[in-house]
Image (tube, rainbow, N blue to C red):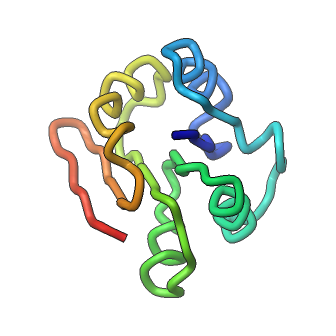
Amino acid sequence: MAFLVDEDLGKRFSDVLNSHGYESLFAGDVMRSAPDDKILAFAEKENHIILTGDKDFGELIFRLEKPSKGVILFRTLTTDPEELFRLSKNMLARAQGRFIVVEEGRVRIRPL
């Protein structure tokens, strides 16, 4: 399973994922400043799950019915990459085919 880290979460988060043995690309390295619909299309084509802090992906997937392999949406106060990893590490293996919202102290999972 591979991940595409949206620019809003930063390259350091992608680096943390890679250092823990996950395959991760940083969106800024492959398509800098691309709009969300292009990021979603790229992730779908390349079979990547999107990690983001941007709620717009929910609208693209649920309201506009755009296809997605999966999304983990972070709604957290922290931006620390290690803390984001700690909050999400149990969800990474479950993200395929799901829209997961990670908050401090709470996780919501919705099938796609």
Give the residue at the far left of this rendering.
105
Residue sitting nearer the eye, 69 or 103: 69
> In the displayed structure, would residue 60 be above or below residue 52?
below
Q: Position of residue 107 (x, y in %)?
A: 21, 47
Q: In screen coordinates, is 47 left or right of 78?
A: right
Residue drawn at (51%, 60%) of the image: 69
Residue sitting nearer the eye, 66 or 13: 66
Residue sitting nearer the eye, 51 or 10: 51
> In the displayed structure, would residue 67 be above or below residue 30?
below
Q: Position of residue 95 (x, y in %)?
A: 38, 49
> In the displayed structure, would residue 85 be above or below residue 63?
above
Location of the C terminus (image quadrant) = bottom left
Q: In screen coordinates, is 14 left or right of 86?
A: right
Give the residue at the far bottom of this rendering.
64
Q: Position of residue 96 (x, y in %)?
A: 41, 53
Residue drawn at (47%, 30%) of the image: 79
Q: Position of residue 42 (x, y in %)?
A: 73, 59
Q: In screen coordinates, is 19 left or right of 71?
A: right
Residue drawn at (42%, 80%) of the image: 62
Residue drawn at (75%, 66%) of the image: 38
Q: How many numbered discs?
A: 0
